[in-house]
Amino acid sequence: MIYWFNCSRDVCQEWMIALGKNHPSYIPSAILSKYIWNFHHETASLKPFLKEKYGKIFHEINSEEPLDVVFKTVSSLVEPTVIHFRVGSNNDLRDEMISQLVSKGYMNLEVNELIWNETEWRTSLGQDLLTIISAGKIIPSILIVWMLWKIIYSGQRNTKFILSYFPDIIEHVHEFEKHVGTISAVFFTTREGELEVELKNNQLTLFTIDSLFQKQYWLWIVNKWDETRFNEMMGSKINYGILTGKWLSGKTSICKHFASKGMTIIDHKAIHDDIKKSYEELPEPPETVPMEAITDKIKEKIKH
């Protein structure tokens, strides 16, 4: 995925003024104007090249929008894949589909089992859960969401997850999407010929969670496991992305947001500066850093 951040020179200047002269990132207006001019000059042929060659994955982002709007726009394409299985009449099919998906790299987050693990391990969260359970109270959804957030954004290589037995009500959905991410698809397992009965028995009306899923997400009614069809439903997610834009267009803020979600940020400029600094120890340091040296470092970071 490639993101191109669009931000006018005037807005960049306004943001720099808002930072204030005492901010470590502050640079005078004249120098900022030069940086912006250099960016446009150096990337004049890059942008049309990327659009032509990578049109399907090239996205122009209006970074003049409020930061939360930009976050939402970009995050929708890089969040982990999270799918949810509703409890239907065909639990055998449900179990078969989960088993097949786990074998293909999905992690099944069975909420009741996760709660039990937290309480058994006496984690800080587990202690809170145990106190609530012992008092006979209902566990607040925010605690379950926090438990799921810790696993999904633990920094492991897993990027595909299954939610089992959660969410149950609309409020759970809102909490999960606010703090964790979007639910990509919802699967409702049924037996062949029972579609109408299932929908009726589960009260698919305007105010139920299943209605919410039907209106806002992909609610798939399935009566058999079909891997080809499943892949068609899900589409694809990205593993790597390029984010670029002029000075003060919001790149650093977005990267910090990605880093908080467990993504690895590879900073081209930081790599360049590190290599250049290492040259200072050489008897005759090169004047410039070869692109091959930067590329090798990037490959090394991706490999690890």
Image: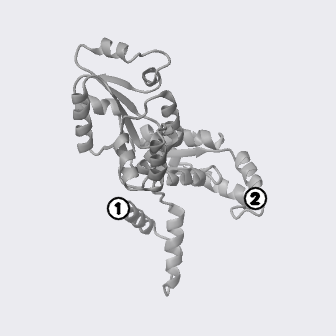
Crowding at label 1, few (<14), some or many (≥20) Cα neighbours within 10 Å? few
Q: Quadrant of residue 95?
A: top left
Q: Is residue 61 above or below residue 205?
A: below
Question: Hey, what amino acid is under mark 1?
Answer: Lys
The residue carrying mark 1 is 303
Tell me the distance, in whole angstroms, between the alpha carbons under discs 1 and 2.
Answer: 40 Å
Drawn side of residue 137 relative to residue 84, left or right: right
Question: Hey, what amino acid is under mark 2?
Answer: Ala
**Image point 42% across, 48% down: which residue?**
152
| Between 79 and 170, the one nearer to me in the picture | 170
The residue carrying mark 2 is 30
Res 58 visible: no
Q: Is residue 82 above or below residue 125?
A: above
Among numbered discs 1 and 2, the one appearing first in the sequence: 2
Dot label at residue 99: none
The quadrant in which the C terminus is found is: bottom left
Q: Position of residue 201 (x, y in %)?
A: 35, 15
